[in-house]
Amino acid sequence: MELDISVRAKVLREEFWKELLESVVPFWECYSPDKAYGGYFSCLDRDGSVFDTDKFLWMQGRELWCFSHLFNHVERKEAWLDLARSGADFLRKHGKAENGDYYFSLDREGKPLVQPYNIFSDCFCAAGLAEYAKASGEAWAEKSAADTWRRIQERKANPKGVWTKQVPGSRPVRTMAMAMINLWMAEVFDSVLDPGELEPVVSSSIDDVLSRHVDWERQAVFERVLATEGRPQGMDGRLLSPGHALETLWFILAAERRRGGDPDRIEKTAQVMLWTAQRGWDHKFGGFYYYRDYENKPTEKLEADMKLWWVHAEALCAFLIAHRMTGRIEFWDWFERTWEWTKAHFPDPEYGEWYGYLDRRGDPALTLKGGKWKGMFHTPRALLVCAQLLGEYGR
Amino acid sequence: MELDISVRAKVLREEFWKELLESVVPFWECYSPDKAYGGYFSCLDRDGSVFDTDKFLWMQGRELWCFSHLFNHVERKEAWLDLARSGADFLRKHGKAENGDYYFSLDREGKPLVQPYNIFSDCFCAAGLAEYAKASGEAWAEKSAADTWRRIQERKANPKGVWTKQVPGSRPVRTMAMAMINLWMAEVFDSVLDPGELEPVVSSSIDDVLSRHVDWERQAVFERVLATEGRPQGMDGRLLSPGHALETLWFILAAERRRGGDPDRIEKTAQVMLWTAQRGWDHKFGGFYYYRDYENKPTEKLEADMKLWWVHAEALCAFLIAHRMTGRIEFWDWFERTWEWTKAHFPDPEYGEWYGYLDRRGDPALTLKGGKWKGMFHTPRALLVCAQLLGEYGR
């Protein structure tokens, strides 16, 4: 069996590298750079044509991270570093509001449009600049990234600040997103900040997920919990996001792998993935749902049964790293099943990259390859992570 | 031809009354009242079971309006007035924040959850109380409704207030929603406020829609315009919402009908409906899209090609009132086509009411009958408006 998987892994490894370097990366290299003003267009239609020129800071930070990461981990191509520099300079010149937080969006030239209401703009820009600092050695980028990291840690208990719509003291709902992003950022900041600064954030994030968001009795990962104890009433407290759960769980496994973590916790974390996969898979049409209700009641999300690219990208990483770390065949099977469905529905061989938003049956609901919430990020990150993991088989 | 339509109108009239009084109204009468704390549950699954007990002020105000309106315009049933009173008292006790604006949501008992960030909470609660005042004669309700109306008119130039995320002076985008809701509210407030107070709001709203949001050259109604001139760049400036356009256009026709308006403007407004219908109809699977891009580029809306109940409810009203007012057969044809598709996909004969959210093909994507954004409103309002209009044929 192990031999079969090694052979298969070698085939898949080639497939993933090919998809990454011949379809996905070229799409963004070709269509997203704004040669006039710097930074990147993210609103790209199927054929790469720009359908909106606004610059969303989530997307700017992510693409900056991605080109820098390719330079750092795939090949030291000057073209990638140049593309990264264009994004980094754009962020330096235009990204931050006076209070030091990143705007949510800018116009093409860099003039601010939407206030810094969203802490994830800061997270993605900080991660982008940290990765860029490793690629370029530019000290300003490292300092800026570290400053933003620290500001995020100060703000994380109250991430929305003045934009909080929840009435104070009413029902303190906390989502899993902050723990998730901190786990990923800690990996990106690995050689930028001291372990003494990163490790407490990693530990508390893992603890937050495993002791608050995972319900071991109900065998599910809940997106929203109360800051106090338990979960909010009703649909908020029952909301499941299989993609988000799988993404967070694989960040935990990756963190444990780096620090040589506790085997029992690794085993348990992987087990939660299986529960999530079983509950999140669409047994009729295939693919993972975007949202589910724990009791199969309706969610408030119109897009609940759509199939999203990032959900599948993160699921691939999750199952593969879990297989590497536990050796359990169920994870390999889930990886194969997910890749089969993904490959059949998301990639666009004609123009490159993946569709982002499919309907439940797997047909594209939107033709776009990038938009306000889809950029150069989940697809290439997952393809690279999987290609690297697949390379470990049969060594 | 006119004779044929009269005969057909009589048949349809019975159908609409039956759907209203035997399927839709009983569903809400039966499942939505919160007998313990007053007000209404709006999160109702297919069979009427409550899947969340929070109270969203949009939905509270709308259901209050609806029961009051049934009492005022269908039958003076004490049960309807009692149900309205339960909603009115709940709003009086719990609805408003200290600054006089309505919260966005409360918990079941009435404790505030989400701040008054959304002016439409005020609009629906004001309309609900105005209609209730007409039904009950209670002076406090009339005064409260009038106060809120005036506050809305003061706030309407900057409806989001401190919650505005747009950077000041950057790109002052204005949506059509404020003009739309003012047109409807003005009808509701007809006997509550003086014509001298209502008429300027009606006139300026009509002017806003016809001279700013309708692009006569491009033959389309654009959701978003710049407060200054023209439309914003990119996807925001190209966004079309066929349901919203049709709803707004029929409010204009209804207002013109009440005030005996200019025949040329009536003709032109009706013509815009035809453009909207042609562009908004899904020529492959039938039904109206939720959102479209004027240039057929992607929108940022994941749910763009879904089929929503309210879009179809408003389209029915639009085509029927346009046929009554212009006599053009195209409107009758659109009315029949829309009703045929609507009847085949939205109503649930087993449990009553309509599904809210269908996928592009017309299958329910969510099983809910009510939620955070769907309550007792568009379906019964449209059925009643259409039943009344159908009653005018052959007189």
Image: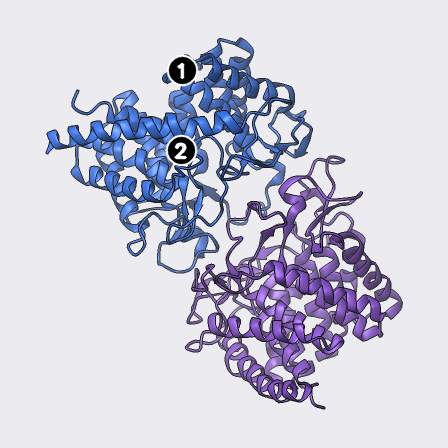
Chain colours: A purple, B blue
Q: Residue furthest right?
A: A196
Image position of B100 with respect to A341: above or below: above
Q: Which quadrant holds the C terminus of chain B?
A: top left
Q: Is residue B228 above or below residue A355?
A: above
Q: Which residue carries the number 1 mark?
A: B72
Kind of residue at disc 1: Asn
* Residue B308 figure quarter: top left
Where, by quadrant of the figure, is residue B350 drawn? top left
Q: Position of residue B209 (x, y in %)?
A: 36, 37
Residue depicted at 44% across the width and 41% down the height: B355
Identified at 80% across, 43% down, the residue is A228
**Three-letter amino acid code of the residue under disc 2:** Thr
Instruction: Measuring from the top left, give residue B207's x and y in whole percent.
Output: 35, 33
Q: Which residue is mark 2?
A: B379
Answer whether residue B257 is visible to the viewer in this image.
yes
Answer with left or right where residue A364 lies relative to residue B163.
left
As measured in the structure, the alpha-carbon distance from the residue carrying label 1 to the one carrying label 2 is 18 Å
Labels 1 and 2: the sequence-earlier one: 1
Q: Which residue is painted at 25% across and 22% down in the image?
A: B260
Q: Position of residue B327 (x, y in %)?
A: 17, 32
